[in-house]
Amino acid sequence: MEEDEKVYKIIELVGASPNSWEEAVEIAVDQASKSIRDLRVVEVSKLDARIKDGKIVAYRAKVNISFKVE
């Protein structure tokens, strides 16, 4: 492969946080970075929240994360 030819793989994850959707995304990226090298881009595809007794108890973010295939 030439220097400018690259291939990326995309995985889908769901991060969850009791505090915010932003933190849910950060948690998903942080966990992915523990086992996958060379993460490149995170794309948020869906946001939702769990409700219990009329209150939000968890923010969830479905994300697509890309990384370089070596």
Image (tube, rainbow, N blue to C red):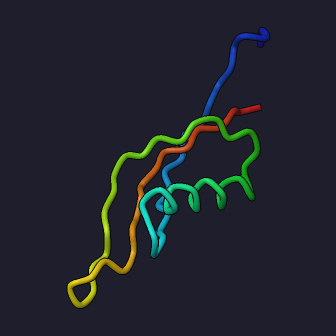
3 relative to 57 in the view: left or right:
right
User: Could you say where residue 12 lies in the image, as x and y percent from the top left?
Assistant: 49, 51
Q: Compared with residue 52, is residue 40 higher up or lower down, i.e. above or below?
A: above
Q: Residue at x 27, y 86 (%)?
A: 52
Left or right, 16 with respect to 37, comes to: left
Classify residue 69 as left or right of residue 45. right
User: Which picture quadrant has residue 57?
Assistant: bottom left
Instruction: Relative to 32, say whether 10 is above or below.
Output: above
Residue at 33% across, 56% down: 47
Q: Is residue 41 left or right of residue 36?
A: left
Q: Relative to 44, does residue 62 appear above or below in the rendering? A: below
In depth, the one of 64 and 22 nearer the eye is 22
- Residue 13, image x and y in percent? 50, 56
The mark total stands at 0
Residue at x 57%, y 36% (from the top left corner): 41
Question: What is the quadrant of the N terminus in the image?
Answer: top right
- Within the image, what quadrant is residue 54 found in? bottom left
For the point 55% across and 44% down, which residue is it? 65
Front residue of 55/45: it is: 55
Judge whether 50 appears above or below 67 on screen.
Answer: below
Residue 22, image x, y percentages: 47, 56
Q: Quadrant of the C terminus?
A: top right
The picture places residue 24, in percent across and down from the top left corner, at: 49, 62
Task: Find the residue positioned furthest to the bottom.
Answer: 53
